[in-house]
Image (cartoon, helix red, strand yellow):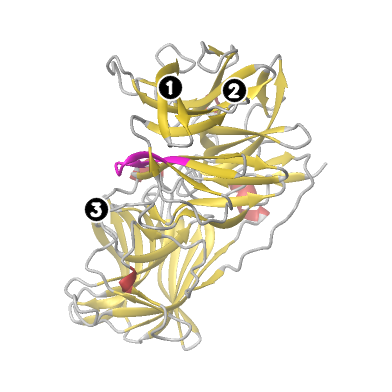
Amino acid sequence: MQTFQNPIVKGFSPDPSICVVGDDYYLVTSTFSYFPGVPIYHSKDLVNWELIGNILERESQLPLADVTHSQGIFAPSIRYNNGTFYMITTNVPKGGNFIVTATDPRGPWSDPYYLDGAEGIDPSLFFDTDGKCYYVGTRPNPKGVRYNGDWEVWLQELDLSSMKLVGVSTKLWKGALRDAIWPEGPHLYKRNGYYYLMIAEGGTGFDHCVTIARSKKVDGPYIGNPCNPILTHRHLGSNYPVRNVGHGDLVETSDGSWYMTCLASRVFEGYSNLGRETFLAEVIWENDWPVVNPGVGKLEQVQEHKLPLSPVESLNPQIQLDQPLDKRLLFLRNPNMEKYAFDERDGWLRIYASQHTIADIASPSYIGVRQQSMWYTLTTKLDFVPQHNGDEAGLVILQNDRYSIRFVAGLFDGQRELRVITNYDGEDRLEARVVEDSNSLILNIKGDCQNLHFYYSKDGKDIEVAKNIDAHFLSTEIAGGFVGCTMGVYVTSKVDVTNSCYADFQWLKQINMEAESHETKKVKLHE
């Protein structure tokens, strides 16, 4: 029997939602404060995924000014009906719940249809067999929130011609427990005469889980599965290497098989720097209830798979920083594109310094990729002449505005140096520095799980700057929030407002070393 390895989408990829069109599968995930928003992946086998675009690629679709790292886009859901793809999501706090549509999943996607009266978060759409479309979402208890997380799942018909909610809204379910907290990520399905409502509950941390209820009518009443939760890892203890399992979505294949995509966090030496990633599990039905990974009941690292595997082309780990931009590249909030010049120097991206830093709730001069492994090398080729004290350019590993690590060249107290700087809870700490006045350098960060090593290349020689810098604080457990780390290039100036300060970057390279000698030893999900 053929097998695959979880996670199926590595790195910061929470809240997966999936739909099928014939033998083609499409998957989307949350992006929070990053731009462009909502990556869309395509697969033929549910295992090998190709990033085919980003759904929200215009500021008119995705305003992100002043949002924090864990605001912005929450829990997108993708569905297909009668030749049209629908993606519905929440922009917190910029306008609430909205829908965009496309006839080609690669885009272009429409501008948002904002939904009046659609309070709450985590919306999804359900297309019934009678032609009606329903909005299903979550909202605070309308009778008054009695405790933190006292929310409910609700339903209302959606008129697709006007993109407006019509009729009355109906409470469907509050979750499996009597005082369940944070019923989220609801999805409706229909099978064998039942409507199924599957949700996440328990919060996004250790107690996260997937639960399900069913009804003979779309508007209920919904009766919970007596075997709830149908998937969780909270019973496995705090030392289990995969935690926070939840937020599932079901999909049926053309041969009648069922699978669930869900999120989970891999833990490395006790910490989850990569954030929440996308996993896949098999589903069977017993007594008209779903059973996840039957006989196992938890996510497996290596899992059997029934569909014929259809590998996709491997991506070049070295991203040329030119146009059209590689689909993997991300900005923080809406970028000021005047700071990014693609035609000033052939084969290079010139990034002009911003006075905004990565510690500001703003749009710094930063472009990066999702961190996908704890064993990696991150490299860039840099050409930079700082103009003022405090000018700096180089590499950044970014968790949020208060937790990051920078490896930068710059002018500090009148002297040109390379510095390794950690930012812990908003406070910069100088970890290492060397005097270096060369303009052209190759900067390297080597990740060895939670230990980072920093060196640069000059005239064909590698020169060490720092080693064994602890990276555990770049994790959800320390930094909080909903995001994983991104890694990229960055330029800032404390005083420059005339664009005299800039840095040229030729490429950004992330080489992941996911060999058996590393991750299978560190992350063993199932024996």
Q: In the rendered image, which residue does mark 3 sit on?
A: 426
Of circles 1 and 3, which is in front?
Answer: 1
Q: State the residue position of label 1.
A: 154
Relative placement, left or right, of 350 versus 496 is right
Residue found 54% across the figure and 25% down from its top: 198
Q: Amino acid at mark 2?
A: Ile
Q: Is residue 521 magenta?
A: no
Splitting the image into 4 quarters, where does residue 94 fall?
Answer: top left
Label 1 or label 3, whichever comes before in sequence order? 1
User: What is the x, y in percent for residue 180?
Assistant: 42, 18
Residue at the far bottom: name it: 459
Q: Secondary structure at mark 1?
A: strand
Query: What span is in magenta?
Result: 88-98
Pointer 3: residues within 10 angstroms few (<14), some, or many (20+)? few
Q: Nearer the viewer, residue 398 or 46?
A: 46
**x, y (%) of residue 10?**
56, 50
Relative vertical location of residue 210 with respect to residue 439 in this rendering, above or below: above
In which quadrant is the N terminus drawn? top right
Q: Is residue 269 above or below residue 163?
A: below
* Foreground pick, 322 / 295: 322
Determine the main secondary structure of the stretch shown in magenta. Answer: strand
Q: Earlier in the sequence, mark 3 or mark 2?
A: 2
Q: The C terminus lies in which quarter of the figure?
A: top right
Kind of residue indicated by mark 1: Trp
- Callout 3, which amino acid? Gly
| Secondary element at tag 2 | loop
Q: Nearer the viewer, mark 1 or mark 2?
A: 1
**Residue at 34% over, 33% down:** 116
**Residue 230: image tag:** 2
